[in-house]
Amino acid sequence: MIRTIKNTLIKPLCFAAPLCLALSASVQAVEVGDSAPDFTLKSLTGDNLNLTEQRGEIIVLNFWASWCGPCRKEMPILQKLQDKYQDLGVQVWGVNVEQDNEAGRNFLKGLDLSFPILFDQTNTLSEDYDVKAMPTTVIIDRSGSVRNVYYGYQDGYEKKYAKAIKTLIRE
């Protein structure tokens, strides 16, 4: 009986535990202070945008989806941030996380956005940035480090975004 338990339960656990630890170690959340994972994604206009090529700029990376009500509310606010701070080296990039980018394109109609919209149809970038909620906004400093991460959106977040951006502009 003990030998059966040992063979059927304990041996597989001894093998699986290190494997699970190794796999979980390879998928780590991006945290404040980490280097922002590099990426290249195609934009709505067909351009490829690469994060590393933007060193020296402050990037506000906003992950969103067409089914997300708070995302719709936040988009005009992000546009205002882009308009106000772009001459000071700030760029807002919107990242649609849906496999069907047509839904994202329909969502954007009538929003009058000038900042780049990127498509992460495979969710690779969303996984790299550990996106847990819609929207998720990540602010990346001029040297490519993650400085702020905001999950979700609530009224008043625009003040937090502006404060974080102003701090980075002064650095």
Image: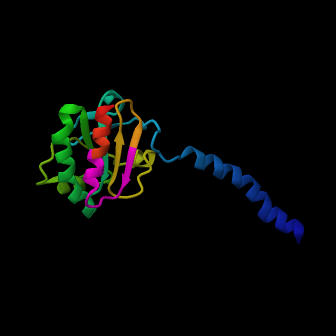
Q: Name the colour scheme.
A: rainbow
Residue 85 appears anywhere in the view = yes
Residue 139 is drawn in which quadrant? top left
- Residue 45 shows in the view: no
Q: At which x and y percent is residue 54?
A: 31, 30
- Magenta segment: does it hold 48? no
Q: Which residues are magenta?
A: 148-162
Position of the N terminus, as image quadrant, is: bottom right
Q: Out of 50 and 83, give the one closest to the viewer.
A: 83
What is the x, y in percent for residue 70?
26, 61
Residue at 74% from the left image edge and 58% from the top image edge: 13
Q: Relative to residue 112, is residue 41 depicted above or below?
A: above
Count of marks, rendered view: 0
Q: Is residue 27 left or right of residue 66?
A: right
- The picture places residue 10, in percent across and down from the top left corner, at 79, 61
Question: Which quarter shows the C terminus?
Answer: top left
Q: Is residue 39 above or below residue 155?
A: above
Residue 110: % across, % down = 11, 54
Q: Please name the residue shown 59% across and 50% down the image.
A: 24
**Side of 140 relative to 66 (left or right):** right
Q: Residue at x 28, y 55 (%)?
A: 157
Left or right? Give the position of 103 relative to 10. Answer: left
Front-most of residues 156 and 67:
156
Q: Name the residue: 32% across, 38% down.
A: 167
Front position in the image: 7 or 130:
130
Reply above or below: 112 against 170.
below
Residue 79 vs residue 24, the one in the foreground: 79
